[in-house]
Amino acid sequence: MDERATWATRIGFILAAAGSAVGLGNIWRFPFLTGESGGAAFLVVYLLLVVGVGVPVLLVEFVIGRRSNRNPIGAFERLGHPGWKAAGAVGAIAAFIIFSYYSVVGGWVIQYVVASFTGGYGADAEAFFLSTASGTNAIAYHGLFMATVAGIVALGIRNGLEKAATVMVPTVVVLLVGLAGYGATLDGAGAAYSYYLAPDLSTIVGDAVSILPAAAGQAFYTLSLGMGIMITYASYIGEDRNLLQDAGVIVVLDTVIALLAGLVVFPFLFTQGIEPGEGGAGSIFISLAGAFQQLPGGEIIGGVFFLMLLVAALTSAFSIFEVVVSYVTDTFDVDRVPTAIGMAAILFVVGIPTALDLTYLDAYDLFANNILLILSGLLLSIFIGWVYAGEAVEELGKGRASDGRIEAIWVTTLRYVVPIVLAITLALSVRDYIGFLQESFL
Ligand code: PHE
């Protein structure tokens, strides 16, 4: 392979993986969960989990993918441990559920793009959000988002999407930095920063039990872990690649974008007098729509912002949809295009309740993220830590000069730290989820 081709591959992989990681999870879900879960205390737990659990599990997926050269289901067979396919299957179910409502939120973004350029969020940003989020419009735009993703897959214009992602990531960063700078000048900024950035140790300790499920679910969600996406993407890369370095780039980029989103959302919310938890799933939409209305040139800035958010959502959605479609084509020996169309239709229907009532959106979201992704991560870490450690260490060592120390820390973390943290999280998540269902539906 010549210099240029190697370089192109490296960028292609990082772009695809970063395109999957950076999405609604960073800009929509992270600030709203932080607001609902107490601000800075949540942030600290989340960051600890990204480093202590997210990074090791991302490396697990990379190693399984590159070692097996297979999709998440086939991978375990190929590695000689077919029983562990269950881990891949849990991930595929999670992908299915997540995609059904991710598309609904994607539909909200399309509505905001349209409203931005046509100057119409109305006078009341909160009321506009509610009319966007649930009802006939929400269903129609959910259908449009779903059709777009299925169309991209069916037409095979994935390259076009990846090119869009090259523009998307830097544009998102520039816009977020600019908006955060503007937010810093607002009246509510001081209160917002102390809420978001000044953790209080006693709150962290006192609330750890309630924070853990949400923070762990978010760490998996935002890094696109637990669904086999990173296994699939890593199955295409060569042995000369340094997996550790690639993981580092992706995690830093993803985390920086989420942190920036918080720096934008909270000053705007505080300035508009909205309690951080009150905006719920609407936080980013309400706070930004309110802000764009006041900014000179806000229509254009708003339009560009939501357009970039749409590209970010599409590159992530694409990666989930791929997993669902390849699972079905591999398992049932059917063709790609009809599968993509059929799955899109099924997912559209499955997502409808979440476009009618935000309680259903929570129900899907919590179940998939806080339970299924955590379960999948638990299985993956046990597999690599206890069953496949030797080979995994060898795989991680490829493509870099290694004295084995990082591998040793990695395996120890996967044996003891990750499974214990995730087992506790899973127990708490299940308990919380039962409580949530009783409260919401009984
Ligand atoms: N990581 C993506 C985001 O942050 C979301 C996602 C979740 C993508 C699950 C794939 C799978 O938006």
Image: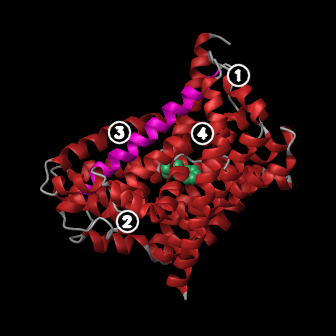
387 lies above or below 98: above
Callout 1 crowding tier (Cα within 10 Å): few <14, some 14–19, many ≥20: some
Q: Position of residue 300 (x, y in %)?
A: 26, 49
- Give amino acid for label 3: Val
- Give amino acid for label 2: Glu
Residue name at image x 52 percent, y 65 percent: 142
- Which is the main secondary structure of the residues drawn in magenta? helix
Identify residue for label 4: 56
Question: Which one is in front in this view, the residue at disc 1 or the one at disc 3?
Answer: 1
Identify residue for label 2: 36
How far apart are the alpha carbons under marks 2 and 1?
43 Å
Determine the image quadrant of residue 230: top right
Q: Position of residue 356 (x, y in %)?
A: 49, 77
Q: Are marks 4 and 3 in contact (CB under 8 Å)?
A: no
Determine the image quadrant of residue 395: top right
Sequence-wise first label, 2 or 1: 2
Sequence-wise first label, 1 or 3: 3
How far apart are the alpha carbons under marks 4 and 2?
27 Å
- Give amino acid for label 1: Glu
Q: Position of residue 266 (x, y in %)?
A: 26, 56
Residue name at image x 61 percent, y 65 percent: 427
The verdict on residue 392 being magenta is no
Sequence-wise first label, 4 or 2: 2
- Give amino acid for label 4: Pro
Give the residue at the far bottom of this rendering: 442
Identify residue for label 1: 239
